[in-house]
Amino acid sequence: MTYNVMAINPGHNGSAALVVDGKLELYIEEERLSRSKYDGNPFKAMIYIMDRYHINEFVIGGTGQENHSLPWTGEDSYSALVRKYYPKAKIHKFGNEHHLGHATAAFYGSGFESAAAVIVDGCGSLKEIEFGDQKIPYYETETIMKCSKPNNFEVVFKRYANNYGPRVSDFEKEVDSTVTTVKAYEGVSMYLGFGFIEAGKTMGLAPYGKKDKNIPDLFLKGTDRGDKNVFMPNYPAGSFIDTERYQYLKQTEDPREWHRDPSKLTEAAKNLAYKVQKETETFIGDLIEKAVDMTGEKNIVISGGYGLNCVANYYYKERFPELNIYVDPISHDGGTTIGLAKLICNQYLLQIEKEVPHDPVTSLYLGPEYDLRDYDYDIKEYFLDAEVSDVTPKEIAELINNKNIVCMYQGRSEAGPRALGNRSILYNPADPNGKDFVNKVKNREWFRPFAGTIMKEHAHEWFDLRGMDETPFMMYAVELQSEKIGELPAITHVDGTCRIQTVSKEQNENYYNLINEFYKLTGVPVLFNTSFNLGGEPLVETIEDAINTLRDSDLEYLYLPEIDSLVRIKGNSRNQEVNQTPE
């Protein structure tokens, strides 16, 4: 019988992962099942797994702030649910070791034999730091760990912060009541009218800005500690900018107004986004240098919330060409479940003297299994307002080339925040109006860029990958080759970069074949690819979610390559009308 370990993250980005005999079998985020963005408390995800697999050990991650007890038994609700399914399952609680979850996920996913893990987080577990007779609570913010197989993780440096308390700095730790790199980024995000957890939107705005002498220094000179004359820390959730002190940053109206109306975007707003992006990516580069100096490692793995900053990830490739850098593709809190489940499963395998398997991340198609053939004969009856017809990849490519948005649904859902061809919205990357068109249809902010997927063998012709052979998980915003500038306007951001996924036939045959048909038709081996959802909603998970998203929007076409079918919502033919609206 297999040995199965299930781990959960009960906080935001709630998720559950299943590791079977040391190999990752399944990962699912609660929001995909509950349809509530950033949903925590992953009960539906747990039930999905426990209905299908026996559980030997159960791991609760998080940050230690989720503690609670139920009446009568005194258990937490997660342990109680597992007990009712599997009374003999062993239970482990890692809420006080949040950064260990990030480090294990990144290290095991990398496939390295040894590495230095660099964890950059807004707020991890709450730790008590001793100051004489006092113990003062501080949050993890940045950590360096020395990692080696099969199961060795040693903290060599850790940075802590809170809203108050004394400052202490030594070789192994730094403790301060300050705003650290991610908290500064969150503070700017909140100033711009986003939630502190929506820092990716700030990253998208940053290239619109430039250096601005009117913006105060965000960090103390020569350090990566936020200036408390600028920021007011608000651990654990974000920080605030003191706009009363700096008149240039003072806002006269709701910042969300410019999210829909670009004419209302101020110089201060876009230049502040530019400044925080440039400064924080430099600081994390310095932290990588510190990790190399402290561990002697040339293999670096990166995780924590800042790991999703695809602009910074590309910057590291330029700054450190001599290092082997792996960025965890599920580096937000949800991904910690993968690392913790592997850690516990590996401990068991070592105890019984079984070999720990080599299990690097090679695919992110880790969601639940679905078989669309179940709908093959009754889909017309099941979706009464839909037209269903047989279709070939060539016909879909022609539809996209004619500037129609086509949604694509197949197979297991993608783990993490990126759509990689199984839950994607596809479009023609050569349409000069494509970004504005799709942003309008998806109900997203006007300034946000889109990604693209390219056939792996053509990647170097079109993009400068800075030494990488591929980028299958869309973790880097890369520059176009000079001779290709201007050819992909719908997915090229204002700074000349594009967040790119490379794909081979082995990685995703149906998606590759579709791009190949588009290439044969147009000479462009690239498709515009964005997540199959509407603004503010989770990615679709089930076929019902997919159809409902079409019903609730101007989206019209749904391609189901596994059953060679095209679904079209009757009367929902506003696709072209939106695209033909003059600017």
Image (cartoon, rainbow, N blue to C red):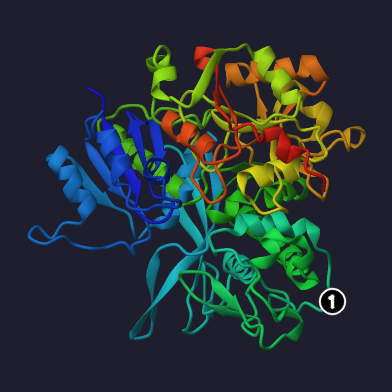
Q: Mark 1 Cα within 10 Å, few/some/many (few <14, many 20+)?
A: few
| In-front residue for pair 46/397 | 397
Please tell me which residue is depicted at 70% across the width and 80% down the height of the picture.
Answer: 252
Asked whether residue 85 is in view, the answer is yes
Q: Quadrant of the N terminus?
A: top left
Position of 235 relative to 433 (above/below): below
226 displayed left or right of 247: left
Position of 203 relative to 110 (above/below): below
Give the quadrant of residue 392.
top right
Q: Residue furthest right?
A: 483
Position of 553 relative to 199 (above/below): above
Task: Tally the marks.
Answer: 1
Percent position of residue 67, x then y: 27, 63
489 displayed left or right of 408: right
Percent position of residue 65, x then y: 34, 65
Please tell me which residue is depicted at 39% across the width and 15% down the height of the picture.
Answer: 378
Q: Residue furthest front?
A: 571
Where does label 1 land, which residue? 213
Asked whether residue 499 is in view, the answer is no
Position of 388 relative to 322 (above/below): above
Please tell me which residue is depicted at 76% across the width and 35% down the height of the picture.
Answer: 467
Q: Residue furthest bottom?
A: 245
Percent position of residue 11, x then y: 38, 56
Percent position of residue 421, x then y: 58, 28
| In-front residue for pair 138/393 | 393
Which residue type does callout 1 highlight? Lys
